[in-house]
Image: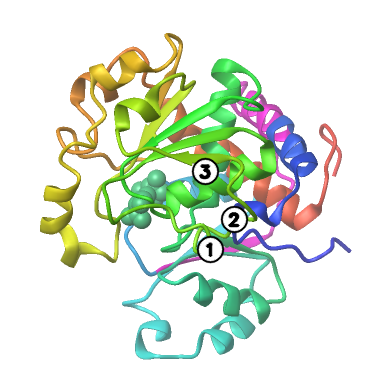
Amino acid sequence: MTELRHYLQFNDFSREEYDYLFDRSRWIKDKFKRYEPWHPLFDRTLIMVFEKASTRTRLSFEAGMHQLGGSAIYLNTRDSQLGRGEPVEDAAQVMSRMSDLVMIRTFEQDVIERFAANSRVPVINGLTNEYHPCQILADLFTFIEHRGSIQGRTVAWIGDSNNVCNTWLQAAEVLDFNVHVSTPPGYEVEPERAGLYGTDHFEQFADPMDACKGADLVTTDVWTSMGFEAENEARKKAFADWCVDAEMMSQANPDAVFMHCLPAHRGEEVTAEVIDGPQSVIWDEAENRLHVQKALMEFLVLGRVSGGEQ
Ligand code: CP
Ligand code: NVA
């Protein structure tokens, strides 16, 4: 039987496991592009629980599970007993007796940790207030496809020190690269909340132009994440100078790529010129959610699989 593992934050896996997952994502993606069926999770069931909105995460997990031969069930807070206060521990006991895998998008990280502690099957973090590990798995795979190994490279994060930023910072520790972070005053990285072991792999810059200098990848995200909508007006004012534009991109290395997890607000955190420009790899980034999460689900349910063997 495969050891029970969860994917709740980026540092749940080792560098060596990520090497495996990136290779496996490549294999699964190539096979998919050749229209060759691959059904290692035949007859398996994924339950997806959404307490926040989603387009990419829902589609990539649901389509991915079907493509692996299994089926996916969608639940949201509004239509399930979770929205009526059923304890998360009880929900975990029940859901994990009816499925092989659970993916959750929720608010506090504590919720998903309590769920996982009571689950008989692997639990995947589909975004919490603190982390978004599946996104960075896809972003790293996309960088590797376009530019090769991330080790020793520099990523510039411009904007809010949110769940996606925290996950980049954890990834830098696990995979040994650097992150330059520039946030407005008052929105700086909190290393403890980001779940970091130290401060060796990131540097904070007051000026976003400085953060972009020498970067191999420039990335940003919305100024107001889901769950923080009440702060929207204050954030729009505070973040006005943290819009990634052509001038910022010109500070980065000439072959730097631009990424955004999406959805994006053109004219706020990034200009249309940049996000729709030649350095942007956002569509590959979005597509790769599908391929890396198929590799992730296969790994969590079956352990390591080599080639077409099961
Ligand atoms: N990037 C991302 O997770 O998108 P969704 O919110 O649409 O799932
Ligand atoms: N930081 C954003 C990411 C959305 C995919 C949010 O949490 O809303």
- At 46% from the left edge and 10% from the top edge, which residue is drawn? 255
Pick whichever, 50 or 132, lies toward us. Answer: 132
Work out how far the residue at label 3 is from the one at label 2, CA to CA, in angstroms: 11 Å
| Identity, as a three-letter code, of the amino acid under mark 3 | Trp
Q: Quadrant of residue 117?
A: bottom right
Few, some or many residues within 10 Å of mark 2 (<14, 14–19, 20+)? some
Looking at the image, which residue sits at the far top?
Answer: 254
Looking at the image, which residue sits at the far right?
Answer: 1
Q: Mark 2 points at which residue?
A: 196
Residue 255 appears anywhere in the view: yes
Range drawn in magenta = 24-50
Work out how far the residue at label 2 is from the one at label 1, CA to CA, in angstroms: 6 Å
Pick whichever, 116 or 194, lies toward us. Answer: 194
Label 2–label 1 contact, CB within 8 A:
yes
* Disc with the residue nearer the chain's start (1 vs 3): 3
Q: Mark 1 points at which residue?
A: 192
Q: Position of residue 212 (x, y in %)?
A: 38, 25
* Mark 3 element type: helix
Q: Mark 3 points at which residue?
A: 168
Q: Quadrant of residue 34?
A: top right
- At 60% from the left edge and 43% from the top edge, which residue is drawn? 171
Would the CB of label 1 be found within 8 Å of ligand 2?
no
Pick whichever, 276 or 75, lies toward us. Answer: 276
Q: Where is residue 47 in the image (x, y as percent from the top left)?
A: 55, 66
Label 3–label 2 contact, CB within 8 A:
no
- At 52% from the left edge and 84% from the top edge, which residue is drawn? 88
Q: Position of residue 301 (x, y in %)?
A: 74, 57
| Identity, as a three-letter code, of the amino acid under mark 2 | Leu
Residue 259 appears anywhere in the view: no
Magenta span contains residue 32: yes
Few, some or many residues within 10 Å of mark 3 (<14, 14–19, 20+)? many
